[in-house]
Amino acid sequence: MGHVAGAEAGGDAAWQEDAFPWKQHVKLGTLALVLWILGALGFYVTLDLFGSTHITGLHAELAWPIIGLAILGLITGYIMNRYKKKRKILPLIHGTINVLLIILVAVECYTGVQVWKDFS
Ligand code: HEM
Ligand code: HEM
């Protein structure tokens, strides 16, 4: 667990040995987490259409842990990318948070489709 810190700075050798696409991981990971946080805008949609929120049951409840974990994923990822060094614990925590997040988002997609079907 953990990758050679500052692979770009240290040259491509370490980079290729490691085979962890650091920059792409940061870019796509950030995109994913920001988009998932923006899913919270769904609260405005329900508020606007129905005058209240938390009307979609599990879909609404899951939004909160998703927002919280996504923020933690962004913070831990940012720290590891900004202050590069050999790490063990933080990548593990970061990885665990984000894998859990992916599972919740999968359930969120499923319940989202259910809500969508119920409304249409
Ligand atoms: C869906 C989003 C994400 C997932 C599932 C995810 C997952 C993971 C996992 C499992 C690792 C551990 C890999 C290993 O050590 O073998 C890791 C490492 C890392 N992640 Fe993410 N991540 C995500 C988003 C982000 C974001 C947004 C950033 C930066 C802003 C980021 C930065 C990093 C960095 C720098 C490492 C390497 C740390 C090290 O080895 O020292 N990740 N990520
Ligand atoms: C990370 C992903 C997502 C998050 C965080 C999210 C979050 C939310 C939130 C917070 C609401 C308002 C719930 C309420 O007040 O009861 C909502 C509504 C809704 N979401 Fe999502 N959502 C996500 C993905 C999806 C997906 C993949 C679909 C599937 C098509 C979907 C479909 C819906 C629908 C149909 C509503 C009800 C909108 C309405 O009032 O007409 N969502 N979502």
Image: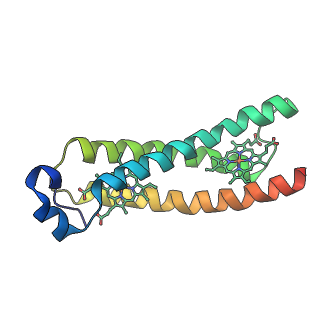
Q: Looking at the image, which residue sits at the far front?
A: 12
Q: Considering depth in this image, is 106 or 24 the residue closer to the camera?
A: 24
Instruction: Indicate whether 53 appears above or below 87.
Output: above
Location of the N terminus by quadrant is: bottom left
Expressed as whole percent of the image width and height from the top left, the position of residue 8 reads: 16, 52
Q: Considering depth in this image, is 4 or 100 the residue closer to the camera?
A: 4
Q: Considering depth in this image, is 68 or 29 the residue closer to the camera?
A: 29
Image quarter of residue 47: top right
Instruction: Indicate whether 98 appears above or below 31.
Output: below
Expressed as whole percent of the image width and height from the top left, the position of residue 49 reads: 85, 33
Q: Considering depth in this image, is 25 or 107 the residue closer to the camera?
A: 25
Expressed as whole percent of the image width and height from the top left, the position of residue 107 reads: 66, 61
- At 81% from the left and 29% from the top, the residue drawn is 48
Image quarter of residue 50: top right
- At 63% from the left and 43% from the top, the residue drawn is 39
Expressed as whole percent of the image width and height from the top left, the position of residue 98 reads: 45, 57
Asked whether residue 116 is in view, the answer is yes
Is residue 71 toward the left or the right of residue 88 in the image?
right
Asked whether residue 67 is in view, the answer is no
- At 79% from the left and 48% from the top, the residue drawn is 56
